[in-house]
């Protein structure tokens, strides 16, 4: 994040020790939702209701007609939901919608303050995913690399308006909080920190099931 601190890095590393990354899978729909910013426009995701599930984080991406991998669907699963409700001290889970389009699984969390969008681009292989990641970074406004312990060893960057993007194996994960206020929740967490913490929660599940 901006002004990355050892505390955030420690939180990230601690998140890799999380276990039980599982959730009931839900149907993938196709209700349209516009991309949140220039970077996410590269994948043009849509939206509809659903949940997540656990499985290998390196599962091979599939053709669009077959739908997203189980690992990709984890972005709409129990772990990011639990983390989100804990950070923001929500009394109930926010409504979510998801979609699968252009090899991208997108889950949108509808909060009172705005929409939080988490997407996973499934590429044919790691090299293609890295090329996609680099293209996103080049298009993103105000992109800054996430470096040191904070990137968990993966290519990663953040944007000033509240997005965090990581590339792992054949996946490109984007948590886009740009529609949210600059700070939110009882602890006034910044949207950048929220995006980062949700990213590491998802990455922890992928690492666990590697």
Image (cartoon, rainbow, N blue to C red):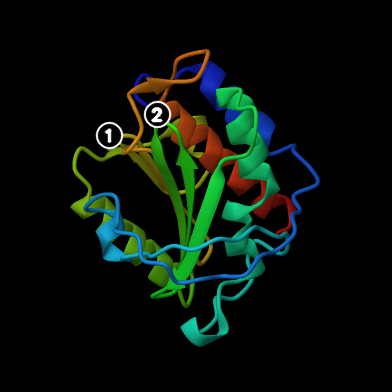
Report the residue at 51% width, 86% height from top: 65
User: Which image quarter is the C terminus in?
Assistant: bottom right
Label 1: how many Cα within 10 Å (few below 14, some 14–19, many 20+): some
Within the image, what quadrant is residue 60 found in? bottom right
User: Which image quarter is the N terminus in?
Assistant: top left
Within the image, what quadrant is residue 14 found in? top right
Q: Where 29 sits versus 11, above or below?
A: below
Secondary structure of the residue carrying numbered label 1: loop
Residue 11, label in figure: none
Q: Residue furthest top?
A: 187
Q: CA distance from mark 1 to mark 2?
A: 8 Å
Q: Where 120 sits versus 109, above or below?
A: below
103 and 166: which one is in front? 103
Residue 152 in sight in this render: no
Would you name the residue on which mark 2 appears?
191
Question: Residue 8: where, in percent of width, then height?
Answer: 53, 23
Report the residue at 51% width, 13% height from top: 187
Secondary structure of the residue carrying numbered label 2: helix
Which comes sooner in the sequence, label 1 or label 2? 1
Q: Where 166 sits versus 171, above or below?
A: above
Label 2: how many Cα within 10 Å (few below 14, some 14–19, many 20+): many
Would you name the residue on which mark 1 appears?
161
Question: Residue 67: where, in percent of width, then height?
Answer: 55, 78
Are circles 1 and 2 on residues that touch, CB within 8 Å?
Answer: yes
Q: Residue furthest right?
A: 20
Question: Residue 45: where, in percent of width, then height?
Answer: 37, 64
67 and 206: which one is in front? 67
Residue 119 in sight in this render: yes
């Amino acid at each position: 994040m901006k002004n990355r601190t050892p505390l955030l890095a420690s939180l990230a590393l601690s998140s890799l020790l999380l276990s039980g990354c599982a959730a009931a899978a839900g149907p993938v729909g196709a209700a349209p939702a516009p991309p949140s910013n220039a970077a996410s426009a590269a994948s043009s995701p849509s939206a509809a209701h659903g949940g997540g599930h656990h499985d290998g984080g390196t599962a091979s991406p599939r053709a669009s007609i077959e739908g997203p991998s189980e690992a990709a669907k984890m972005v709409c699963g129990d772990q990011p939901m639990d983390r989100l409700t804990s950070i923001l001290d929500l009394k109930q889970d926010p409504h979510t919608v998801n979609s699968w389009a252009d090899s991208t699984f997108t889950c949108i969390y509808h909060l009172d303050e705005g929409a939080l969008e988490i997407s996973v681009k499934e590429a044919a292989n790691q090299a293609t995913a890295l090329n996609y990641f680099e293209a996103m970074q080049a298009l993103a406004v105000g992109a800054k690399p996430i470096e040191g312990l904070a990137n968990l060893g993966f290519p990663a960057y953040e944007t000033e308006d509240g997005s965090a993007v990581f590339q792992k194996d054949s996946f490109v994960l984007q948590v886009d909080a740009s529609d949210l206020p600059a700070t939110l929740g009882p602890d006034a967490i910044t949207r950048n920190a929220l995006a980062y913490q949700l990213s590491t929660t998802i990455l922890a599940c992928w690492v666990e099931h590697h």
